[in-house]
Image: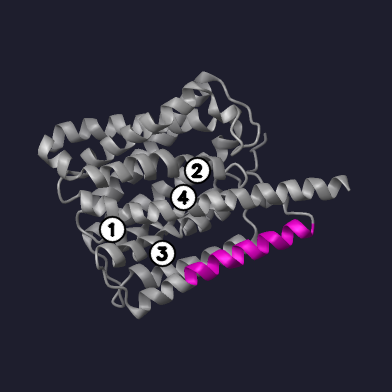
Amino acid sequence: MRLKMVGKMVDSRALRSDILLFITALIWGFAFVAQRVGMEDVGPFTFNGIRFALGAFVLAPFVLFGADRRTCLTRPAGTGTSGGILKAGLTAGLVLFAGASLQQTGMVYTTAGNAGFITGLYVVIVPILGLFLSQRASAGAWVGAAFAAAGLHLLSITKDLTMCFGDILVFAGAFFWAAHVLIIGRFSPRMDSFKLALVQYAVCSVLSLAVAGARESITFVSLENAAWPILYGGVVSVGIAYTLQIIGQREAPSTHAAILMSLESVFAAVGGGIILHEHLSSRQLAGCSLMLFGMLVSQLWRARLAVEGGDEADQEPLEKTG
């Protein structure tokens, strides 16, 4: 009886994690539209600097009132030392800055849909980078990633295998997003989620604003014109979604989380089509279908392992010994 109760608790945590990561993907997908629209009035570093500052301000009250130790959204976890949180937040913030900068700059030259599709390539990069960190992924995660990769190929690469300059920048950023998934997967179970998120937002904002001050022209009129995209990008995409990522990854292996969050590519395509009237070809629609199938394979495989007693290699990152 006790084992069944423990199993139900694990399943409920896993389901909650999947729901949070799915919502994260939904918000991020439509954020590509906001990012593309915002580029009409402000530079990429200005946009990122302000939106991550907004995200930090949204999160600050939760940190001040110690929400992570009391909220029903998280399981009890060590709060970590101040030095440890600062170190982890600085590391995550630097990688976040690199990924966000390449993505946002690339969106000056490409569409919201393309940026979403190509960013989703981190679903393939995560398990590859994870091997260098002694992390193992289940066979289901690899199969799901393979289908997702095939789908992303149909979505983002033309038949003659060409990519525009913006696509290349976004592709380079995908490696940093993959690294960010692994970093959050390693640190989030060990420390206060909200404090970790706040530090990484602040680091990314300060670095982005520093570059914006040196390279871009910032005027009140341009900020006013881009107010709504910046508010969505800051309050919803950063303040809410990035925090949900950290909370959700507490119960999800990095590769599994990456497959779920890669659905932002599909939502970016939907948002681009509805709001920006970006056309989806039959080839791209086929890619969306493959991505959804990849997620389903990963989910069903994980459910089977849970019924059979679980796969320890797919539950937590392995620590290096010796």
Q: CA distance from mark 4 to mark 1?
A: 24 Å
The residue labelled by disc 1 is 168
Residue 132 or 35: which is nearer the viewer? 35
Taking the image as drawn, is residue 177 in sight? yes
Dot placed on the residue nearer the N-terminal end, 2 or 3: 2
Contact between labelled residues 2 and 4, with CB atoms less than 8 Å apart: yes
Taking the image as drawn, is residue 218 in sight? no
Asked if 241 appears above or below 283 in the picture, the reply is above
The residue labelled by disc 4 is 24
Q: Which mark identifies residue 244?
A: 2
Dot placed on the residue nearer the N-terminal end, 3 or 4: 4
Residue located 58% across and 53% down the image? 18
Q: Nearer the viewer, mark 2 or mark 1?
A: 2
Q: Is residue 133 left or right of residue 221?
A: right
x%, y% of residue 48? 28, 40
Q: Secondary structure at mark 3?
A: helix
Q: Main secondary structure of the magenta part?
A: helix
Q: CA distance from mark 3 to mark 4?
A: 13 Å
Which contiguous range is marked in magenta? 290-308
In the rendered image, residue 304 lying in the magenta stretch gets the answer yes
Q: Nearer the viewer, mark 1 or mark 3?
A: 3
Q: Amino acid at mark 4?
A: Thr
Q: CA distance from mark 1 to mark 3?
A: 19 Å
* Label 1 CA crowd tier, 10 Å (few <14, some 14–19, many 20+): some
Asked if 237 appears above or below 275 in the picture, the reply is above
Dot placed on the residue nearer the N-terminal end, 4 or 1: 4
